[in-house]
Amino acid sequence: MTSKQRAYLKSLAMNIEPILQIGKATLTPEITKSVDEALEARELIKINVLKNCFADVKEIASVLAERTRAEVVQVIGKKIVLYRESATKKKIELPLAKKNK
């Protein structure tokens, strides 16, 4: 993912609300499944990590991205933004990456 594409996704993410919350149970198989389903339906999702979760937010983001084959767009404070292109319901058109001449 290019920096231009990441910036575009960040701008889209500013206007969406978190759809999932991760608490003290951190990453359960159910959370991972929910994230996977949400990514397929929406492509871009925001996740809120609650204060009672003591795991590192960046670590949670990277593990979730790995398990769901998604890209971490950004981690700010206790919020995670993930992106994965939907196989069936493509909604977001990313800016094209520039080709080297």
Image (spheres, helix red, strand yellow):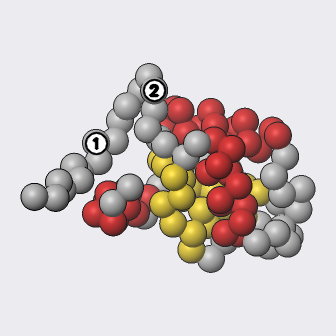
Which residue reaches farthest left? 101
Q: In this rendering, would 35 be left or right of 94?
A: right
- What kind of element bears circle 1? loop
Q: Position of residue 54 (x, y in %)?
A: 85, 72
Q: Position of residue 52 (x, y in %)?
A: 86, 70
Q: In this rendering, would 27 be left or right of 96?
A: right
Identified at 53% across, 33% down, the residue is 40
Label 2: how many Cα within 10 Å (few below 14, some 14–19, many 20+) = few
Q: Are marks 2 and 1 in contact (CB under 8 Å)?
A: no
Q: Position of residue 71 (x, y in %)?
A: 51, 52
Which residue reaches farthest right? 25
Which residue reaches farthest bottom? 77
| Rendered view: 47 above or below 7 | above
Q: Which mark is residue 87?
A: 2
* Front residue of 1 and 31: 1
For marks 2 and 1 on the same chain, the one whose residue lies earlier in the sequence: 2
Question: In the image, what residue type sits under mark 1?
Answer: Glu
Q: Which mark is residue 93?
A: 1
Q: Which quadrant does the N terminus fall into?
A: bottom left
Identified at 77% across, 66% down, the residue is 50
Q: CA distance from mark 2 to mark 1?
A: 13 Å
* Front residue of 15 and 34: 34
- What kind of element bears circle 2? loop
Q: In this rendering, would 48 be left or right of 56?
A: left
Q: Which mark is residue 59?
A: none
